[in-house]
Amino acid sequence: MEYRRLGRTGQKVSAIGLGCEHLDGKPFAQVEETIRAALEGGVNIMDVFMPGTEVRENIQKALGKQRGHVQIQGHIGSTNIHQQYDISRDPAVIRRAFEELLRLFGYIDYGMLFFIDTPKDYADVFETDFINYARQLKDKGDIRYIGFSSHNPETAMRVIETGLVDMMMFSVNPAFDMLPSAAYVFDHIETGFGADLFRGMDPTRALLYKLCAKNDIGMTAMKTLGAGKLLSREHTPYAEPLTAAQCVHYALSRPAVASVLPGCQTADEMRDMLTYFSLSDKEKDFSRVISGVRNDFMGQCVYCGHCGPCPENIDIAAVNRYLDIALLNEQRIPPSIRAHYHHLQARGKDCTQCGQCETRCPFDVPVIEKMQQAECLIL
């Protein structure tokens, strides 16, 4: 394992960590095996943004006595309302969710101001008592450092310039970095990832990396594999898919990036990610692949869950995940996918087309259309 300094926090973090999102809903034995594989591989940083009590308890139990050797990113504002994930800026709601996290883990190394992408997000956090709550947590020692998560470079730079944050988690992959981001990176999704959009590193994102390096703001990287789409021949914007190692190498080569946090859900996936350190420079090199661009990288769900909560209790990310798998095997949809889909508490047929999900989605996914498509295809 390689360890890197996380900016001005001074903390050394493993170059590959673990994003625990995909451990949500998994049995304890699987959570334990995955975390054990991470620890055995030298991983010492994990992201726990999920608000559900069960997954948090499973992670805490799996860590056991190793808790003190692992640095945890815990998110302030990620909440669980009616058993569904939501983003909240309400003081009472965020306190209740975060204090549960503290109860389980004792303290949180990086208290992350959750999902700051838009001017409104910025105002809701930095022009209210939200930021005061985070500062109080740090003063009391409940969190060691204040961080934040974002997908938008301009908003992220505005946060950094407050001087109040010590580190950040940001979406880093070559497709995102080359997409124009004058206002908000996902504003351009509907136009496609056409070759005419790619003119080298987007200057706004390049400026963000430079600002982080200048201000000594360490970065942890999310969405490094583009929700798996960069690895898929069907969905990559390039002439051929990248490998996981090439995606990791790209992220770790960005200024200020200290750690990549892939969302592994099994011990085997975690061990596969850690083979990165045994590969040659040639095997990690991404430059040849990203020099060839084709159309249409995104337009699909990346299963981030920001669309919820659904009034009809549809697990939108799960429906879209099963739909994407079905589309890749449309002529012979695996029986397991049909079974998993039918066992969901609510399915595509239950969508009332209220549109709340589409207003929340940072990727402009046509959720209503995809709910209808899933119900027609997977039945």
Image (cartoon, rainbow, N blue to C red):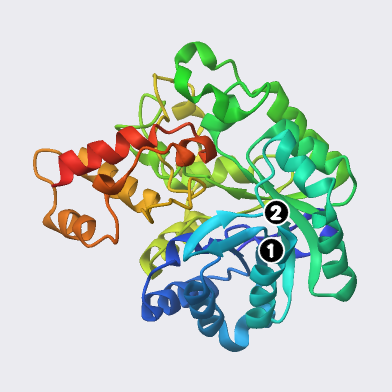
Q: Which residue does the image show at 36% across and 76% down from the upper left?
A: 27
User: Relative to residue 226, is residue 125 depicted above or below?
Assistant: below
Residue 44 % position (x, y): 63, 70
Circle 2: is it few (<14), some (14-19), or many (20+) Cα within 10 Å?
some
Is 135 or 307 nearer to us in this picture?
307
Q: Which residue is mark 2?
A: 89
Total numbered badges shown on the rendered structure:
2
Looking at the image, which residue sits at the far left?
332
Residue drawn at (59%, 40%) of the image: 172
In the drawing, what numbered circle is on residue 94?
Answer: 1
Given residues 134 and 211, the one toward you in this image is 134
Q: Amino acid at mark 1?
A: Ile
Q: Is residue 49 visible?
A: no
- Residue at left 59%, top 62%? 79
Q: Indicate left or right for 244 with 92 as reference.
A: left
Q: Amino acid at mark 2?
A: Arg
Q: Residues within 10 Å of mark 1 (few under 14, many from 20)?
A: many
Q: Residue 35, position in %: x, y?
A: 49, 74
- Please, what secondary structure does the residue beneath circle 2 have? loop
Q: Position of residue 133 (x, y in %)?
A: 82, 63
Is residue 79 visible to us here?
Answer: yes
Looking at the rendered image, the quarter that the N terminus falls into is: bottom right
In this picture, residue 191 sits left or right of residue 318? right
Q: Quadrant of residue 293?
A: top left
